[in-house]
Image (cartoon, rainbow, N blue to C red):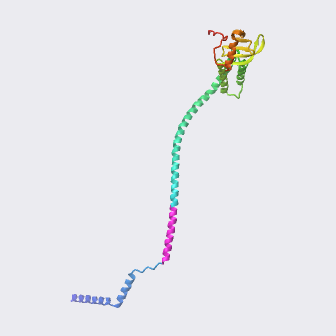
Amino acid sequence: MKTHRLKTIALTAAATFALLAGSPVYSAEKADSEAAAAPKPKPKVPVGAVINVGERRVADAKKSQATIDRLAAETGDLLQDYKTIMKQVDGLRVYNARLEKQIAGQLRRISSLDKSISEATIIQRQITPLLIRMIDGLEQFVELDVPFHKEEREKRVEFLRKNMDRSDITIAEKFRQVLEAYKIENEYGRKIDSYKGVAEVEGSERDVNFLRIGRIGLLYQTTDGKQSGAWDKNKGSWVELDEGDYRGAIQKGLRIARKQASIDIMKLPIPAPEAAE
C-alpha cells in the first residue's frame, strides 16, 4: 500500500517536469542564457589608424637602431683606447723595471761618491803642499838646466806660483797646470828647435840664431854667420867655436830645425855623457 503511493508520487513529479520543459517560458530563459554565453563580435578598427601605428613603430625602430649604432661605435672606440693604454702600461712596466736597476746602480755610485767626498778634504790638504814642492823643483830645474827659452820658462814657473794663491781656481785645475808645465819641459828634451835671441859674444851682446838639440846641445850663430858658439854646462858660459869646423854644421842644423831641410847627420860639439853617481 505504501509502495504503491510512492510510485504514484514519482510519476506525478515526472509528468510535472515534462510539462515545464515544454512550456514557452522555459524556452525563452534558455535562449537568453545561451545568448549571454556566446562571444560578442569585435568592433572594426579603421585602416588609417593601423598605418599610423605601424609608421610610429618604424620611426621608433630607426631611433633605437641609431642609438645602438652610436653605442656600438663608442664601445669600439673605448675598446681601442683600452688596448692602446694597456700597451702603454706594458711598456711602462718594462721601463720602470729598467729604471729600478739604474736607480740601484746610481745608489751604489752615490754611496761610493759619498765616501770619496769624505776623503776629498784630506786629499786636498795633501795635494797643495805637493804642488808647492813640484813648483819649487821645477824652478830649480830651470835654473840649473841649459839656458834655452830661459825667460819663457821662468815666466811659466812664476805663473804657476801666482795661481797657487788664487781662490777662483780649483785645486784640480792647479794640479793640471803644474802637470802641463812638466810635460812641456819633458818635450824640450825630445825635439830640435831654433829661435832668435841675444847672446854675449866677445863681451858684447849680439843678435844670434840659437840651435837647440834636445837638452844635450845649445849652440848659436850670429846673424851674419861669422861667429858660432856653444853652451858649456861645466863652465856655465858660452864657448866660441872654430868657424871652419862647425859653421856649416850649425847652419845645416838651423835649416833642419826650421823644416827647410831633411834630417841628416851633423857634426856638432856635443859633450859626452857622464856616468851617474
Q: Residue at x 55, y 37 (%)?
A: 102
- Taking the image as shown, residue 67 lies to the left or right of residue 39, namely right
Residue 51: image location, x then y, percent: 49, 74
Quick check: can you spot residue 130?
no
The residue closer to the viewer here, 20 or 30, is: 30
Identify whether 86 is placed above or below 232.
below
**Which of the 4 image quarters holds residue 1?**
bottom left
Residue 225: image location, x then y, percent: 73, 14
Residue 73: image location, x then y, percent: 52, 57
Q: How many marks?
A: 0
Q: Main secondary structure of the magenta part?
A: helix
Residue 209: image location, x then y, percent: 73, 17
Identify whether 85 is placed above or below 137.
below
**Which of the 4 image quarters holds residue 147?**
top right
Identify whether 62 is placed above or below 230.
below
Identify whether 185 is placed above or below 75.
above
**Which of the 4 image quarters holds residue 21?**
bottom left
The residue closer to the viewer here, 207 or 117, is: 207
Does 52 appear in magenta?
yes
The residue closer to the viewer here, 259 or 78, is: 259
Does 14 appear in magenta?
no
The residue closer to the viewer here, 237 or 66, is: 237
**Residue most extreme to the right:** 204
Q: Quadrant of the C terminus?
A: top right
Quick check: can you spot residue 194?
yes
What's the magenta region?
46-68
Q: Residue at x 61, y 27 (%)?
A: 119
